[in-house]
Amino acid sequence: MNYIEAKLKFINTWGTLGSLWGINKAMAQIQALLFVSTSPLSMEEIMEELKISRGNTSMNLRQLIDWGIVTKEFKAGERKEYFSTEKDVQELTRIIAKERSRRELQPAVKTLKEVYTITDDGTAETKELIKQTKALHDLAETADTMLNRLVSHKQNWLTKSIFKIFN
Amino acid sequence: MNYIEAKLKFINTWGTLGSLWGINKAMAQIQALLFVSTSPLSMEEIMEELKISRGNTSMNLRQLIDWGIVTKEFKAGERKEYFSTEKDVQELTRIIAKERSRRELQPAVKTLKEVYTITDDGTAETKELIKQTKALHDLAETADTMLNRLVSHKQNWLTKSIFKIFN
DNA sequence: TTAAACTTTCAGTAATTATTGAAAGTTTAA
DNA sequence: TTAAACTTTCAATAATTACTGAAAGTTTAA
């Protein structure tokens, strides 16, 4: 496998993995492309490499910027915008974990709380609903707390965590 | 909010959350329904409650069974099959973590290794591709190891983990 | 100002994914 | 066996989601 094939394989794998995790394919591919690029890329270059339209590129770049994963760069004397992604995997993981907590975990915790705090009318069905949704709520909240503490540890948190858990 | 509303809200939230995580909506809803049900349900009852077709119910139940989250039950003297889900959230989490590792993380690790072990032709581009995919590979492998160890700890692993990490 | 160089928006369309429902398949009781 | 009671399959279709490309918008240099 040569450079071109390997790069393509990486971008495609990342794209597929992205869809599996609810992230759209183009978005994941753009991030992958920037992740292995030696310098920031212009929209033109991204379109060209991934064979996607201007509109698609623009919208997905915006989403990546919203997530805080990609930043715009300006080259001196150039009108064009250039884009680059966070290159450090640990930092990247921290950003993604933080965003997913905010966008998904926190709303879920809120809804679960609304459900398990309904008034107990004494029936077995209601008791089961309360019991089970409370259990989920507590798990989700614990997971969220864990994630949030994790993302406030800047250095080597993953390795450290493993050491602490299994020793 | 009464029982019926709360149950519906839970099922819908779970369904939406499922789609967000790459799990199909009906599958997540069936699991949610069984999760708060006081007894195993027949296919007929699931169809009725969720207003989905027989085919859809059958296919998604099979997937849930494949995942190891749902089991068939037989009632004495009855021909019909009844279905129930794992009720313990910790156990549920363990099963899901294990399956996702097997289905997603492990193939990704394998592909990343293929990419970062290409021969280094000395160019900056190749060096960057190797460096970045290796960093991702190592992260994914560490995460996978962590998950797998986690799922082999049966009791209260999540709470324990948090205690250990942050003390 | 103007106009060139760029980016964003969005209606229309394409691609993908989920769902239905009826036919085929299976199991069991008589 | 047969036929009733059930489950599974899968081609057709519906629903959802992604993508395109051209028009509108923005910025900057002259």
Image (cartoon, coloured by chain):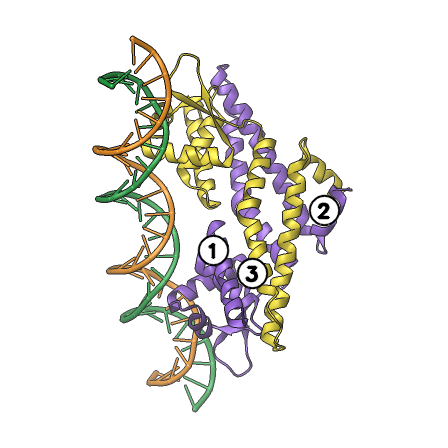
Chain colours: A purple, B yellow, C orange, D green
Residue at horizontal 76%, vertical 44%?
Answer: A164
Q: Within 10 Å of the Cα at label 1, are there few (<14), some (14-19), or many (20+) other Cα atoms?
A: some
- Report the side of D7 relative to B107 (left or right): left
> Looking at the picture, does residue B85 appear above or below residue C19?
above
What amino acid does circle 1 point to? Answer: Thr
Q: Earlier in the sequence, mark 2 or mark 3?
A: 3
Give B94 or A35, whichever is nearer the viewer: B94
Quadrant of the rendering where the N terminus of chain A is positioned: bottom right
Q: Label for residue A69?
A: 3
**Percent x, y of residue A139:** 60, 34
Quadrant occupied by the C terminus of chain A? top right
Q: Amino acid at mark 3?
A: Ile
Viewer-nearest of discs 2 and 3: 2
Which residue is the site of mark 1? A16
Q: Nearer the viewer, mark 3 or mark 1?
A: 1
Q: Which mark is residue A162?
A: 2
Q: Nearer the viewer, residue B18 or B111?
A: B111
Rounded to the nearest angstrom, the CA distance separating label 2 from label 1 is 28 Å
Residue B157 picture location, percent across and down:
68, 35
* Label 2 environment density (alpha carbons within 10 Å; few <14, some 14–19, many ≥20): many
Q: Amino acid at mark 2?
A: Ile
Find residue A133 and report its horizontal and vertical position in percent: 53, 29
Tag 3 secondary structure: loop
Q: Give SS at disc 1.
A: helix
Q: Classify B166 as above or below A124.
A: below
Q: CA distance from mark 3 to mark 1?
A: 18 Å
Classify residue C18 by image quadrant: top left
Give the x, y percent position of residue C5: 42, 81
